[in-house]
Image: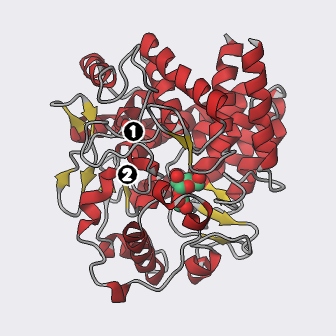
């Protein structure tokens, strides 16, 4: 490893230490002081490169918040008093009998990267016998999580799981949601009064608009009134989407859970079967042949969301596209719409630069995010698209190296945006560096 990489590694570890909250790591001390579901899965992958037991503890702590029905809520409030909106008091998880009795959580979910994270801890483990025990202990929990997703979020057994809130996608104000949210919450009487905290911590121009938050709160309030019972949530939600990123991660998580089952001598079915079914459904329903990218489907308005975001390339991560699709995707990636090889830009902005409403500094509407980049980087490597993979890898390491471990970055100049010392940025830099060490 070069001296520069060594320095980066040390700084990344410092970020994760700074955000440590006992048994878990928060995404950012000021902006996000609780435990987030997919953040923790990414964080554990980074921790696994230098501290196996802390990585295991990170996920163990997350699974403490798992509900009886198997769902992993998107936020766990281990210390409910820490300032964040919407906090434990808003969600009132205790209104559901499925929620854990001694811990406050939210009631919605986030992308399922957990089996992938657990398998990566095992692969990186220095103490393999300890890691094997960890797999055995977590297997029933992961199994319950996957059964929840399959039975509740794919009730028609289509191979695609739905999301019912932009927060469930992990990309809150993505331009993807502009159309499905357009006709929601017109009547302000139906929105409980609330006060944001995020835009007092971060420059509001880099965060979602108040009108976005109105819709987030309106939807979350519907779900609370349903006591987080999925059947009613689905029936009442005006926002129901088959999302490309969520389903790509679902597909890979099932491949990884099948692998975990094989390692510990359990049955890899049904996970292997579900992964195949999802890959087929993503190709069948979500591929946009005109543009060389995968697109979401809006189940309420029964139409595709013709919006091209970087996460539309994440099926590469799960080995979903065939050769012609891969070529078409590479052509689109390697263009001025995203970031062409050798051009003066950072690969990849979260949204097509030529798309309407592209905003290079506004949260999920343009800036570069390290987790999406990392998924695409891994996907490109998996598919042998090495030249462009190195181009994305360069951004993953250069952006935090030059500008600090920010939450997101401006795609042309690289300026750091959102929270500083952001955990998954640090964790995925560590994973990217470690990947090289393993070679
Ligand atoms: C952001 O979302 C939360 C709500 O869940 C927020 O804005 O308060 C998203 O970037 C999400 O993907 C992430 O998990 C979370 C914590 O980093 O922050």
Real-space Cα distance between discs 2 and 1? 10 Å
Asked whether the residues under the numbered discs 2 and 1 touch, taking CB atoms below 8 Å apart as contact, a structural biologist would say yes
The picture quadrant where one finds residue 334 is top left
Beta carbon of the mark 2 residue lies under 8 A of ligand 1: no
Residue 423 picture quarter: top right
The structure residue drawn at horizontal position 38% and vertical position 63%, both measured from the top left corner, is: 164
Above-or-below relation of 400 to 212 = above
Q: In which quarter of the image is ligand 1?
A: bottom right
- Secondary element type, mark 1: helix
Depth check: 235 or 424 in front?
A: 424
User: Can residue 70 be seen from the camera position used here?
Assistant: no
Mark seen at residue 417:
none
- Left or right placement of residue 416 versus residue 16 in this view: left
Residue of label 2: 174
In this figure, which residue is indicated by the disc labeled 1? 311
For the residue pair 360 and 298, the one nearer the viewer reads as 360
Residue displayed at 41% across by 39% down:
350
Of all residues shown, which one is farthest toward the bottom?
189
Left or right of 114 on screen, residue 175: left
Q: In which quadrant of the rendered image does the N terminus lie?
A: top right
Q: Residue 141: x, y in percent?
A: 64, 53
| Picture layout, residue 17 above or below residue 147 | above
Can see residue 51?
Answer: yes
Q: Which of marks 2 and 1 is nearer the N terminus?
A: 2
Q: Please count the marks in the image.
A: 2
């Amino acid at each position: 490893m070069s001296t520069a990489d060594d320095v980066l590694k040390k700084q990344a570890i410092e970020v994760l230490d700074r955000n440590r909250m006992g048994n878990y790591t928060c995404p950012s001390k000021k902006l996000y002081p609780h435990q987030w579901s997919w953040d923790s899965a990414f964080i554990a992958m980074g921790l696994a490169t230098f501290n196996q037991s802390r990585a295991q503890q990170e996920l163990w702590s997350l699974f403490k918040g798992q509900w009886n029905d198997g769902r992993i809520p998107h936020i766990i409030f281990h210390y409910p008093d820490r300032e964040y909106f919407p906090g434990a008091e808003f969600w009132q998880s205790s209104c559901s009998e499925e929620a854990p009795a001694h811990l406050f959580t939210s009631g919605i979910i986030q992308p399922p990267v957990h089996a992938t994270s657990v398998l990566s801890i095992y692969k990186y483990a220095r103490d393999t016998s300890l890691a094997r025990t960890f797999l055995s202990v977590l297997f029933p929990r992961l199994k319950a999580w996957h059964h929840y997703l399959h039975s509740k979020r794919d009730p028609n057994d289509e191979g695609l799981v739905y999301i019912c809130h932009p927060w469930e996608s992990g990309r809150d104000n993505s331009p993807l949601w502009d159309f499905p949210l357009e006709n929601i919450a017109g009547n302000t009487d139906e929105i409980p009064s609330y006060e944001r905290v995020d835009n007092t911590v971060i420059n509001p121009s880099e965060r979602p608009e108040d009108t976005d938050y109105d819709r987030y709160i309106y939807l979350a309030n519907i779900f609370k009134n349903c006591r987080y019972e999925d059947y009613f949530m689905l029936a009442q939600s005006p926002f129901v989407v088959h999302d490309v990123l969520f389903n790509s991660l679902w597909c890979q998580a099932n491949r990884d859970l099948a692998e975990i089952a094989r390692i510990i001598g359990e049955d890899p079915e049904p996970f292997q079967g579900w992964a195949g079914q999802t890959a087929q459904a993503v190709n069948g329903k979500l591929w946009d042949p005109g543009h060389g990218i995968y697109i979401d489907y809006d189940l309420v308005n029964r139409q595709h969301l013709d919006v091209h975001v970087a996460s539309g390339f994440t099926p590469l991560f799960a080995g979903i596209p065939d050769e012609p699709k891969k070529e078409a995707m590479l052509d689109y990636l390697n263009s001025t719409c995203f970031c062409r090889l050798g051009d003066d830009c950072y690969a990849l902005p979260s949204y097509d630069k030529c798309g309407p409403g592209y905003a290079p500094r506004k949260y999920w509407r343009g800036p570069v995010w390290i987790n999406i980049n990392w998924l695409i980087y891994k996907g490109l490597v998996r598919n042998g698209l090495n030249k462009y993979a190195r181009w994305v890898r360069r951004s993953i390491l250069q952006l935090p190296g030059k500008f600090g471990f920010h939450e997101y970055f401006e795609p042309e100049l690289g300026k750091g945006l959102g929270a500083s010392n952001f955990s998954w940025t640090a964790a995925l830099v560590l994973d990217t560096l470690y990947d090289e060490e393993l070679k």
